[in-house]
Amino acid sequence: MITEYQKQEVLEVLGTRHVSKIAKYFSKQEIYNRDHCPYSSIFISRVFNGKVANAKVEDGIFAAVENFKIDQATETARREEILKQAKKDKENV
């Protein structure tokens, strides 16, 4: 089960609408329930809040956090490159 400390750490990384971000990651990675359907937001929230234990969802939550951090770093680098190129183009005009 996810501990209160882990919950707070995940919230710090994912921020608001964390369950939606996790559900989106699950969908991309095809992390489904035993009926091969997407996990509901309610179920993800219950696991996230430590009300229900589900190893597959818990592992998926931490994988989503890891992926989110990588995506954020990539997006930051992309934005910096755009700004650098815009500044370079402005100097050449």
Image (tube, rainbow, N blue to C red):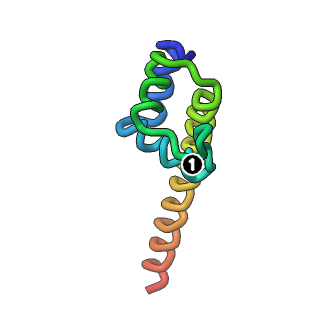
Q: Secondary structure at mark 1?
A: helix
Q: Which residue is mark 1?
A: 73
Q: Nearer the viewer, residue 29 or 40?
A: 40
With respect to residue 37, does 48 lie above or below? above
Q: In the image as oriented, which residue stretches furthest toward the bottom?
A: 93
Q: Position of residue 27 (x, y in %)?
A: 54, 50
Q: What residue occupies the far top of the structure in this picture?
A: 4
Quarter of the rendering containing residue 14: top left
Which residue corresponds to the image point at 48% horizontal and 21% vertical from the top-left? Answer: 7
Looking at the image, residue 31 lies above or below residue 89: above
Relative to the observer, which residue lies in front, 14 or 55?
55
Q: Residue at x 43, y 86 (%)?
A: 93
Q: Relative to 69, is 89 on the left or the right?
A: left
Q: From the viewer's perspective, is 73 left or right of 23?
A: right
Most extreme residue toward the left, as rendered? 16
Q: Amino acid at mark 1?
A: Ala
**Along the line of sight, the residue nearer the viewer: 79 or 62:** 62
Quadrant into which the N terminus falls: top right
Residue beneath the point at 61% across and 35% down: 60
State the image coordinates of residue 26 (x, y, percent, origin top left). 56, 45
Is 83 displayed left or right of 16 in the figure? right
**Residue at left 48%, top 79%?**
89
Q: How many marks?
A: 1
Residue 16 point in image, percent of width and height: 35, 37
**Between 14 and 3, which is closer to the camera in this rendering?**
3
